[in-house]
Amino acid sequence: MPWLLSILGLVILLLAGDALVKGAVNLSLRLGVPALIVSLTIVAFGTSAPELLISIKAVLDNAPGIALGNVVGSNTANILLVLGIPALLATMHTSECDTRKTFNFMIAASVLFIGLASRGVFDWLAGLVLLGGLAYVLFDQFSEARNHRNACRGDDAEEPEGADPDMPGWQIGLFLLLGLIGLPLGASLLVENATIIATAYGVSDTVIGLTLVAVGTSLPELATTVMAALRRQADVALGNVIGSNMFNLLAIIGIASLVGPIGVDPEFLRFDLWVMLGASLLLIPFVHLGRDITRVWGIVLSALYALYLVLVLM
């Protein structure tokens, strides 16, 4: 049964990711705002739902290490794995997208996060600072949406692939709802049953936490990004990853730290946080230098994530 439920979880993830991409693209067309902005808000928040639920539960269960490790590990996986695997399937033409401002926001959020982590604990004060940063980012994105600025430098007259100008509002809402509900449901099914399988084979709880939980909570981003890459929606793919990482740092830890204090293990400051920042800086060629994420880059990013797991598990 765990094997069947794991497969079911994977199928739900893929279908929900496809639904969320369709809903986001058509919502951006209906509202007259760039798909990137929708990806940075609705899509990013939806794909970050598993991290939010797990982190809050970890704090309530007095397991702050899981809450912090979940977010830091997920952010690293989002860049190396979530962008790496889709690039193996199809080149993502990120050179056509202007994500410089939002990328800079993500780097600033990462530096702020590391700075607050150096205090040794994420308490209510740190939570308010993080949520304040989130409010600023959201205000900026909504301001851009209100001003109808295009985030991509492509042909404005060309409708994005998968967009249907005649799609009724209720259908757009249904796609978004199915995606937002299906992604955390599919991730939960897959992670819980994969954990049962791993435990049955004698894999330790530590290994399960470092691999299945971090990767499992990144599966919604992976499913959404894979479908966006196959639909040639590079703006949705890249916006999803950047937006999700910002939500993880600013919203999830911000909210979780208001539920209870989150202690910072010194190992995070010695290694994991810097790996997360280094992985984020790997996006510079795609954001600032106009490079596409090709299959070669997909191999490099995926291999770096495999190396990271090896170093963590040694």
Image (spheres, rainbow, N blue to C red):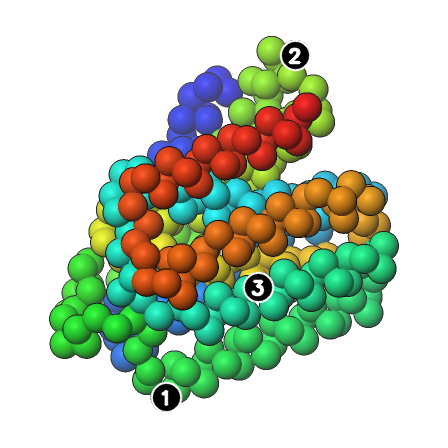
Q: Residues within 10 Å of mark 1 (few under 14, many from 20)?
A: few
CB contact under 8 Å: marks 1 and 3: no
Dot placed on the residue nearer the N-terminal end, 1 or 3: 3
User: Which amino acid type corresponds to the residue marked 2 in the rendered image?
Assistant: Gly
Give the alpha-carbon distance from disc 2 to disc 1, as whole Å.
Answer: 56 Å
User: Which amino acid type corresponds to the residue marked 3 in the rendered image?
Assistant: Ile
Q: Residue at x 33, y 50 (%)?
A: 293
Q: Residue at x 56, y 46 (%)?
A: 76
Q: Which residue is mark 1?
A: 147
Q: Residues within 10 Å of mark 3 (few under 14, many from 20)?
A: some
Q: Which residue is mark 3?
A: 107
* SS at circle 1: loop
Query: At which x and y percent is residue 19?
Result: 31, 52
Q: Is residue 297 above or below residue 130?
A: above
* SS at circle 3: helix
Give the alpha-carbon distance from disc 1 to disc 3, as whole Å.
Answer: 25 Å
CB contact under 8 Å: marks 2 and 1: no
Q: Is residue 48 above or below residue 217?
A: below
User: Which amino acid type corresponds to the residue marked 1 in the rendered image?
Assistant: Asn
Mark 1 or 3, which is nearer the eye? Answer: 3
Dot placed on the residue nearer the N-terminal end, 2 or 1: 1
Q: Residue at x 39, y 52 (%)?
A: 179
User: Label for residue 277?
Assistant: none
- In-front residue for pair 297/191: 297
User: Label for residue 202?
Assistant: 2
Q: Residue at x 36, y 43 (%)?
A: 297
Q: Is residue 276 above or below residue 36?
A: above
Q: Is residue 257 left or right of residue 174?
A: right
Query: At which x and y percent is residue 255?
Result: 70, 62
